[in-house]
Amino acid sequence: MATQARSPRERYREQTRSEIKEVAVRQLAAGGVESVALLRIAKEIGVSGPALYRYYASRDDLLAELVLDAYTDAAEAVHAVDTEGGGRAALHALIRAYRAWAVANPHLYLLIQGTPVAGFTTPPETVLRARSVLGPFLPVFAEGRPLAGLDPLLAEFQIWLREEPDVTAWVAQWTGRDPADPVAAVALTGAIMAWPQIHGTVGLETAGQFTGMGHDPATLLDVQTTILADAFQLR
């Protein structure tokens, strides 16, 4: 079925919303979340304050869309990685791609992973967007043979898989595994373990906390990735 052509009004609305977000992202990059101001955005794009509120009812509405866009950008960076062959090489490639995106876009990274904005509630779709970022990690860890020390965590994730249909569907989408299959829990455990490890290092780096410490954060993250790959005995 052919896509229905958008009316001039719809195209104008879409273009204006895009301009608003572009200015908001520049403000975010210049001064963080607190610098994002609807009235200043309205002035920059040449519309009145009341006119701008027809596109975004509040700053929180605008921030919600920026959060979703940031997760989408991060997911695109990770999904672009060639993971053919799997194993630790694929894991290193995925984590390096995510770090590269975060370092290139620290304002977007800190928007989604930094200090929560007071009074701001992320939209429900945020969970799905975050899972999209982690999705490519699941088939990589599905190949793993976790060391015995990971058994307590594996047991907890096996329960989570059985009790949470959304998680079951997410893991199945990326691995093709039924929740009763032990491989599904291995994949989930690895992906979730990768998440805080990535953000522990990348978060400190984007916030400038490694300045003057005498090491390259990329090297630190590579070593941490190797240790994680060893824990799952990835080839």
Image (cartoon, helix red, strand yellow):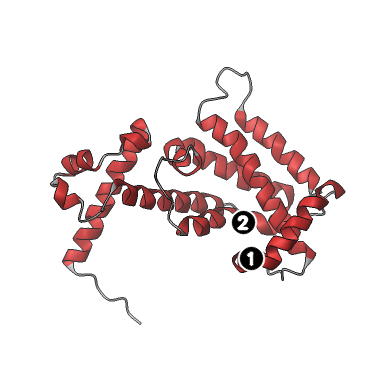
Q: Tell me where residue 14 appears, x and y as whole percent.
A: 25, 59
Left or right for 92, reference 25: right
Q: Which residue is mark 2?
A: 136
Whole-percent x, y for residue 226 in the image = 74, 40
Q: Is residue 42 above or below residue 12?
A: above
How many numbered marks appear? 2
Badge 1 local density, few (<14 within 10 Å), some, or many (20+)? few
| Discs 1, 2 touching: Cβ within 8 Å | no
Snapshot quadrant of residue 180: bottom right
Name the residue at 82% across, 54% down: 145
The residue positioned 46% from the left and 59% from the top of the image is 125
Q: Residue at horizontal 71%, vertical 51%?
A: 190
The 10 Å Cα crowd at callout 2, few under 14, some 14 to 19, many 20 or more, is: many
Q: Amino acid at mark 1?
A: Glu
Q: Which residue is at 36% across, 47% downward?
A: 63
Residue 188: image location, x then y, percent: 69, 57
Query: Which residue is situated farthest in the bottom direction here?
Result: 1
The amino acid type, in three-letter code, at marker 2 is Pro
Camera sees residue 235: no
Residue, disc 1: 164
Element assignment for label 2 = loop
Cα separation, mark 1 vs mark 2, equals 20 Å
Is the N terminus in the top left, top right, bottom left or bottom right quadrant? bottom left
Q: Element under label 1? A: loop
Q: Is residue 63 left or right of residue 136?
A: left
Furthest toward the front, the residue is 119
Quick check: 157 above or below 173? above
